[in-house]
Structure formats: C-alpha cells, structure tokens
Amino acid sequence: MSAPRRISVLGATGSVGAATLDLIDRASPGQYEVVALTARTNARELARLAIQHKAEFVAIADPACEPELRQALLGQPIEIASGEGGVIEAAQRRADWIMAAIVGAAGLRPTLAALRQGTALAFANKECLVCAGGLFMQEAARCGTRLLPVDSEHNAVFQVFNGAHRANIDAITLTASGGPFRSWDEVRMQSAVRADALAHPTWDMGAKISIDSATMMNKGLEVIEACWLFDLPEDQVRVVVHPQSIVHGMVHYGDGSVLAQMGSPDMRTPIAHALAWPERMTAPVERLDLIQAGRLDFEPPDLERFPALRLAREAVQAGGIAPTVLNAANEIAVAAFLDDRIGFLDIAASVAEALDRAAGDEDMPSQLGAFDDVFAIDKRARELARDLMGVPAAQNG
Ligand code: NDP
C-alpha cells in the first residue's frame, strides 16, 4: 500500500474548504493525512475540523481568536499558531497537495508560501492571480509547482485543454450563471439588498464570491485568471451566460470542434478532479441527467447592467497595476455593500472610480515588477477605495 498523501487546506472553514474536507472524510482510511488547516476567525469550526481529521497543525489568522482555539483543542496533540505568520507557517508544512481556498488578496502570501513547496497546488483563490498573475505564474514555473485549477470553469477548461494542440485553439469559453439578478432591470438592481445578492440561483458559496457573482465581477476576475492559467490573450477568453450551470467551460479548436465539460453544479466535482489528478476518483455528487435537465440555454452577458465584467476586461487589457487596483477596490466595495454602506450598483461604480483615481495618484506605485510592488499597490488601492466610499480603515478590508 502506498503512503498516505499529505494534504493541507488553507481556508478550511470556508465553502471550498468544507467541500474539500468532505471528500477527504469519505476517502478510505489511510489514503490521506491532514497536515495543516487554517481559518481567519472561526476558531470553533477550525478546532472541530482539526480534531475530526487529526490535523498536525492549525493556524488562525486573527490573533484575538487564538485563546478560543487553544481552549477548544486542549489536550489534543495539535500544534497551534496565529496571525498571518501562523497561516504562512501552515502553508509551509510539508504537504503533497495543498488547497488554496482563502478568500481575497489576503490569501496571496500564504498561497505563495504553499506554491513554493513545489508540489501540487489546488487553486481556488482567484484573487491571487488577478492581483499578481505574471509573478505568480513565473514563481510556479520556477518552483516546479503543478497548479490545478479548482474554479469550476477553469477546471472544466483544464479537463479539455490539450496543450499539445495549443496553436490550434481558437478560444475558450467560461460560462456564467448570470447570478440572482440576471433578469432584473437596473431600477430593481439599484434597490437590491444583501439578502437578494447572496441568494445565488445555482451555487452555494461564500459571501464575497456570491456578491461577485451578482455583479458579474466574478466572471471578470475569472477572465483574468484564465488568461494567466492558460496563457491566452483576453480576446480569446469568451464569456457566455448559461443559467443552468451545467456546461462549465469549453475549448474551441481550430477544426471546429468544441470540447465542453459538464456536470451538476457542485464544487466537489472540480475539487475531486484536482484531488485525484491525473487519475479520477468517485465524488458524492448528483449525477447529471440531461433528460431531466431538459434544456441548456445560452445568452450573451449584458455589459450595461453588469459593467463589472467590462471593467475587468479593460483592466486586463490595460495590464500593469490595473488588475491589482481592480481587485483591491472590489474587495473594499463588496465588504462595504455587505455592511450596508453602499448600494448594489455602487459596487461597480466605486471600482471604476478607484481605477480612475489610481491612474492619477502620485502615491500609487507605477511598476509591478516584484511581489512587494503588488502588496504596495494593493494597500494604496484600498486606501483610495475606502476614501471614496467613506469607509473607515479599521472596519473594512
Ligand atoms: P469563504 O468565505 O466561504 O471561506 C474563506 C476562507 O478563508 C475561510 O476559511 C476563512 O476563515 C478564510 N479567510 C478569510 N479571510 C482570511 C484572511 N484574511 N486570512 C486567512 N484566512 C482567511 O470563501 P469561499 O470558500 O467561497 O471561497 C474561497 C476562494 O475560492 C475565493 O477566492 C473564491 O473566489 C474561490 N472560489 C470559491 C468557490 C465556491 O464555490 N465557494 C468556487 C470557485 C472559486 P473564516 O471562516 O474563519 O472566516
């Protein structure tokens, strides 16, 4: 029998983290060994998962939550750390496969630490590629790390993308559900509240990505992510609205063939693909029944009602600091919306305004040549975004 695979999950208490640990939990005994788990504030759930999976090491990003974590793990042979340093230490623990599922640019340092192990990195934290794409991909190549896309659309493309035929690939298509406001007019969207925006029609996800799906910024971030993962220019990454979320991604080959990956909308499918890669495993997901589904609809995205997708495309075309600014401003705007500080349509409007201000800002670094530049641009963009939304620093992002 082969040795158990050593697995770590960064962002273990989140939606992707929970789906990953659910698959681990159902595996045969001795197949996996859980090395490190992390969270930000949810000490109780982190402790429960660590005990259930016999983790070696846990880290909680918010140091104020460390006492609760220690109390919950009293008497357990589990090492405990806190703060960003603790999360980075968790990411550095020797592992064969690491799930990067922290939300937002806050995941960049730990994800980089995981990437530098040079093993397999299951990649959910798309914001890392949006804010530091070129540097991140270079670092993955330098370290010999296998990046396994977990975002369902990118995982779909990864499954049908034949690198040997790269020159004959016309384009890829990422599908979008259209989110909860697909059929709402702008007047109605203006008055959308938190609960409306969080009510995703097909996927059950964390709060930030649910709001990004409602604005369609998520699809914009995914276009940028796909450009980096598959080394394609922005105009070869298409988006089509597909409300049933059954076709996740497609590759269009030069001979007219279009290869698509389909499945019920359940993140355990792409996670299982990344976990078993290059083999396959059985996942406890609802099997796709096309007769029961009945129909598959496709429509173009409406860039008037969903300007965030256009902003993301413009940012990746502009290059340089623009995607980093876009991501930072969006994180602040989403948090402000979730705090009832700004309206739904203000999210994209604020991101547009932050991009404009950043372009003329004397304190904004103009170069993006190293990871330190990314952190400086991200920090300054957050200041600009908070300032224009009137958000105090301590309360948001
Ligand atoms: P969740 O909000 O559900 O979970 C986020 C996780 O990250 C939690 O464990 C959270 O801890 C932790 N976390 C949050 N902030 C920090 C921080 N500053 N430092 C360290 N840890 C932190 O997010 P999702 O699981 O929905 O998404 C995770 C990533 O995966 C995102 O980048 C998202 O875009 C991507 N993704 C998600 C999909 C989904 O279906 N959910 C699909 C495709 C991609 P705590 O619980 O303590 O707050």
Image (cartoon, rainbow, N blue to C red):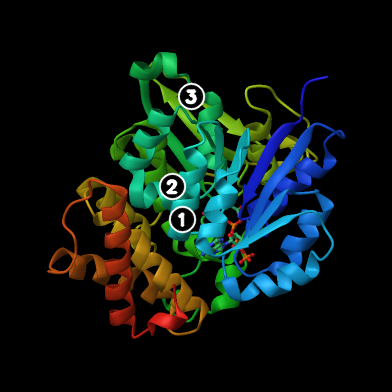
Question: Would you say the residues marked 3 and 2 are in contact, meaning their CB atoms lie under 8 Å apart?
Answer: no
| Secondary structure found at label 3 | loop
228 relative to 34 in the view: left or right: left
Label 1 to label 2, Cα distance in Å?
6 Å
Q: Mark 3 CB in 8 Å range of ligand 1? A: no
Give the residue type that dot 3 points to: Phe
Question: Would you say the residues marked 1 and 2 are in contact, meaning their CB atoms lie under 8 Å apart?
Answer: yes
Give the residue type that dot 1 points to: Asn
State the quadrant of the C terminus. bottom left
**Closer to the N terminus: mark 3 or mark 2?**
3
Name the quarter showing ligand 1. bottom right
Where 17 falls versus 264 (above or below)? below
Front residue of this view, candidates 123 and 49: 49
Say the numbered circle drawn on residue 218.
Answer: 1
Give the labeled residue for mark 3.
Answer: 161
| Secondary structure found at label 1 | helix
Q: Mark 1 CB in 8 Å range of ligand 1? A: yes
The residue shown at (73%, 37%) is: 288
In this view, which residue lies farthest toward the right? Answer: 29
| Secondary structure found at label 2 | helix
Where 351 falls versus 221 (above or below)? below
